[in-house]
Image (cartoon, rainbow, N blue to C red):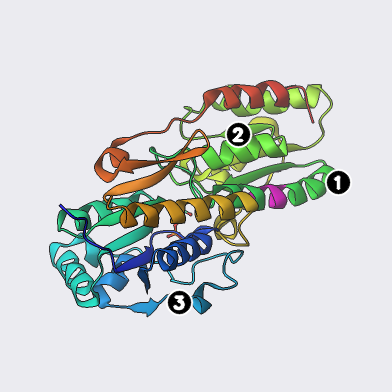
Amino acid sequence: MEQRKIKRIGVLTSGGDSPGMNAAVRAVARTAMFYGIECVGIRRGWQGLINSDFIILNGDMTRHILGRGGTILYTARSEEFMTEKGREKAVSTCKMLGLDGVVAIGGDGTFKGALELSRLGVPVMGIPATIDNDIGCSNYTIGFDSACNTAIDCIDKLRDTMQSHERCSVVEVMGRHAGFLALYVGIAVGATSVLVPEHELDFQKDVVEQIQNARLAGATHFMVVVAEGAGSAIDIGERIHEALGLDPRVTVLGHIQRGGAPTGRDRETATRMGYYAVKAFAEGRTGSIICTREGGIVEVPIEEALAMQKHLQMDRYEILRAIASVGH
Ligand code: F6P
């Protein structure tokens, strides 16, 4: 049977934004143009599909956005899309706009929505973009590298003042239920201790003894990095005060980690992912997430992708402990 020619696709960004989303939108729109496919930007994620909130993505719209943080398409977390009625409205918009497919850029919430939509007959491709790097099917998610570098930059600055005052700093980083961001950042800033949700906290061993060992080795300031999923930095600061008599300063980095220009890695990965998502449509394949594996790109069916899990590399945790315990 002859393959149906794809004429028009939609692209949206959904869930928490991440640096590099614009680079992915650009790659989707431009690859579509390359294949002679029209590209419609759906604004405000799945909610935009319900509300028929769109813009035509032409060449001009995709200029000067490769290195821009945030997302020009805006993003949202849609409650209405969780309902059957909301999804029916979204399908109607797809029909009204004549969309032959939708590229959804975001995290696992976005992909759950993508699966529901594909079950209603709309062809969908997904692109993983979240600073948490917590998508099981893909080694890497767009925005992780940028967020790590932003957090590293902030913590380097904190270190300057902590070192001058010979203080203890407790820094909370994002990551939702995962410790990928915290562990990577912790290693890169030479943290005294890193707390991640994947490791059950033994406060005495993981925090008190790490600080004591560093002190005995000559350190006069200490940096404790807490993944938001592992607990509150404020609580950890209080416990450090009680156990060791230190007067820690607590910093919650928060949404600053989601902003800023994407790094080269995020721009390059987003561009490849956007290209392959549209190429799949153009070649008649749908219903998958574009994932990175061993440096290359693979397509993983959405349902299978959602069931996959990715584990924190605990050897990195051991590396950090070993190196931190001999002081800064
Ligand atoms: O998933 C990205 C993320 O930044 C998480 O790290 C964080 O827990 C969450 O989103 C914050 O969400 P919001 O922007 O809705 O506060």
Q: Earlier in the sequence, mark 1 or mark 3?
A: 3
Instruction: Kindly identify which residue carries mark 3.
Output: 58
Mark drawn on residue 194:
2
Q: Earlier in the sequence, mark 2 or mark 3?
A: 3
Instruction: Kindly identify which residue carries mark 1.
Output: 164
The front one of 13 and 166 is: 13
Q: Residue 58: where, in percent of width, then height?
A: 45, 76
Please say if 147 is above or below 31: above
Please say if 112 is above or below 238: below
The front one of 67 and 14 is: 67
Q: Is residue 153 on the magenta stretch?
A: yes
Locate residue 264 relative to residue 78 in the image: left or right: right
Tag 1: residue type?
Ser
Range shown magenta: 151-155
| Helix, strand or loop for disc 3 | loop
Q: Which residue is drawn at 33% across and 67% down?
A: 10
Q: Is residue 98 on the magenta stretch?
A: no
Please say if 159 is above or below 123: above
